[in-house]
Amino acid sequence: MEDNTLLDEVGGKPMLEKVHKHFYDELYKHPWLKNFFLHIDQKIIEDQQTDFMVANMGGGKIYSGGMPKNVHRHMYITEELFDLRSKILKESVLACGVPEDLADRWIRIDSAFKHSLVKKSVDNCEKRFFTDEILNFPKPS
């Protein structure tokens, strides 16, 4: 899904970088979500997410990473996990000063990829590489 004017309206790539820094700071310390990022450098994932969203907000095709379905196919992402991540993303967007109406458009774009990420069961996960593990973390109590 693309929204070809949103990038400029939210403040350009610098605002996306600011939001993604805040967002991943939250994810990397979250008791459940942090498990999906244990061996991933935060700055790298922030940059990848920024480039991905720049491309989906009208900033040109600068993203060179994998498509969401392939990159996340080894992760058991439930509806609950996705919704939790979306909530934290929206809080991060708003915390960085993006107006509510633009934040809602941002979340709509992000949510358009939900069908590529959420799986009904761990059996729907696939390894990307021979050495991959299926990432499946129980909800902390």
Image (spheres, grey):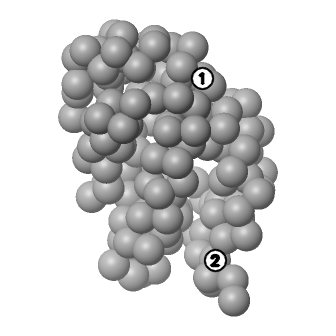
Q: Is residue 25 above or below residue 60?
A: below
Side of 103 where 15 appears, left or right: right
Badge 1 marks a residue whose secondary structure is helix
Q: Measured from the top left, where is residue 105 in percent x and y?
A: 28, 36
The residue singled out by tag 2 in the image is 137
Along the horizontal axis of the image, is 114 left or right of 76? Answer: left
Camera-side residue of 124 and 36: 36
First in sequence: mark 1 or mark 2? 1
Q: Residues within 10 Å of mark 1 (few under 14, many from 20)?
A: some
- Looking at the rendered image, the quarter that the C terminus falls into is bottom right
State the residue at coordinates (71%, 62%). Answer: 30
Placement of 87 over or under 90, stated as above or below: below
Label 2 amino acid? Phe
The residue nearer to you, when weighing 100 against 118, is 100
* Of residues 129 and 32, the one drawn nearer to the viewer in this rendering: 32
Residue at the spot 63% in from the left edge and 83% down from the top edge: 138
Please tell me in which quadrant of the rendered image residue 67 appears.
top left
The image's mark for residue 17 is 1
Q: Residues within 10 Å of mark 2 (few under 14, many from 20)?
A: some
Amino acid at dot 1: Glu
Viewport quadrant of the N terminus: top left
Disc 1 to disc 2, C-alpha distance: 28 Å
The vertical placement of 66 against 85, above or below, is above
